Amino acid sequence: MSGANVISHPLVQHKLTIMRDKGTSTQGFRRLLREISTLLCYEVTRDLPLVRQTIETPLAEMQAPMLAGKKLVFASVLRAGNGLLEGMLELVPSARVAHIGLYRDPETLHPVEYYFKAPDDLNERLVIVVDPMLATANSAIAAVHKIKERGANNIRFLCLLAAPEGVAKFNENHPDVPIFTAAIDEKLNEKGYIVPGLGDAGDRMYGTK
Ligand code: PRP
Ligand code: URA
C-alpha cells in the first residue's frame, strides 16, 4: 500500500489541534498524547482478525469472538514513542513491548541508535511501531529495519503527524508496512521539522529543550 491511512475521527482532530498550540503546557501535552493514543490504537487495530471461542455466560454456552493469534507487540521509538505507548497499553494491556532507542542527529538528520530490546518471537506477532512524528522518516525507516532484522514480517507504523516527504520515503523503503497517522502536514522546513507541526514532540512531552 502507498500513502498513509489518515485517522480523521473528530476527537482525534480536536485533541491534535490543542497539542499543536504552543500555549499548551507540558502537562496538558502529555495528557492529550495519552488520550489521543487510545483513539489511534482503536483505529490501527480496527481490522484485527477474530476467532470464535466457546465460553459459558451465566445463562448459556456460546461461541464468542476473541482476538486471534499471539499477543500484539507495540514497539516504541524512544523517547517520544513512549507517549503513544502508554495510552495504547491502557487499551491493550496484554500487549508485549519492544523499545527502540534512536535519536535524530540535528545536523545530519540521520538516526543514532542507542538501545534495542524486543520479544524474541516477533515473526509470530503483529508489531505496531509507534512514534508521534514522521518527518524525514529516517528514524522510522531505521526502526522498522531493526524490527524486520529480528524477524517481524507483519508490521504497522503509527504516528500522530507526518510530513508528505516522510510518507513518500517510508513507502519507498517499506512498501509492506502501512502508515497510520492523524494528519499529513504541509512540508518539512530546512531543519527537518514538520510545518506547521507541533514542534519537537519529545521536548514538549518532557519539558526539555
Ligand atoms: C523525533 C521523533 C522521531 C524523529 C522524527 O525524535 O520522535 O523519532 O524525531 O524525525 P525523522 O522522521 O526526521 O527521523 P528525536 O530524534 O527528537 O528524539 P526524542 O524522541 O528522543 O526526542
Ligand atoms: N521530530 C519532532 O519531534 N518534530 C518534528 O517536527 C520533526 C522531528
Image (spheres, grey):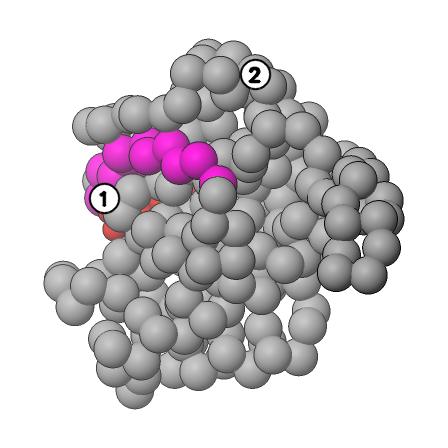
Query: Nearer the N terminus, badge 2 or badge 1?
Result: 1
Quarter of the figure with the C terminus: bottom left
Q: Main secondary structure of the magenta part?
A: strand
The answer to whether 116 appears left or right of 51 in the picture is left
Residue type marked 2: Asn
Is label 2 in a helix, a strand or a loop? Answer: helix
Which residue is at 50% across, 68% downward? 36
| Residue carrying label 1 | 106
Tell me residue 76's x, y (percent). Answer: 38, 41
Q: Is residue 197 magenta?
A: no
Residue situated furthest front in the rendering: 59
Is label 1 in a helix, a strand or a loop? Answer: loop
Picture quarter containing residue 96?
A: top left
Mark 2 Cα-neighbour bin, 10 Å: few <14, some 14–19, many ≥20: some
Picture quarter containing residue 18?
A: bottom left
Residue type marked 1: Pro
Tell me if I can see residue 188 in this picture.
no
Front residue of 91 and 111: 91
Which residue is at 26% across, 65% downward? 205
Front residue of 92 and 204: 92
Tell me residue 56's x, y (percent). Answer: 76, 49
Quarter of the figure with the N terminus: top right
Q: CA distance from mark 2 to mark 1?
A: 33 Å
Front residue of 47 and 12: 47
Which residue is at 48% across, 41% downward? 95
Label 1 beta carbon less than 8 Å to ligand 1: no
Which mark identifies residue 123? 2
Q: Relative to 109, say whether 193 is above or below.
A: below
Tell me if I can see residue 23 in this picture.
yes
Which residue is at 48% across, 43% downward? 94
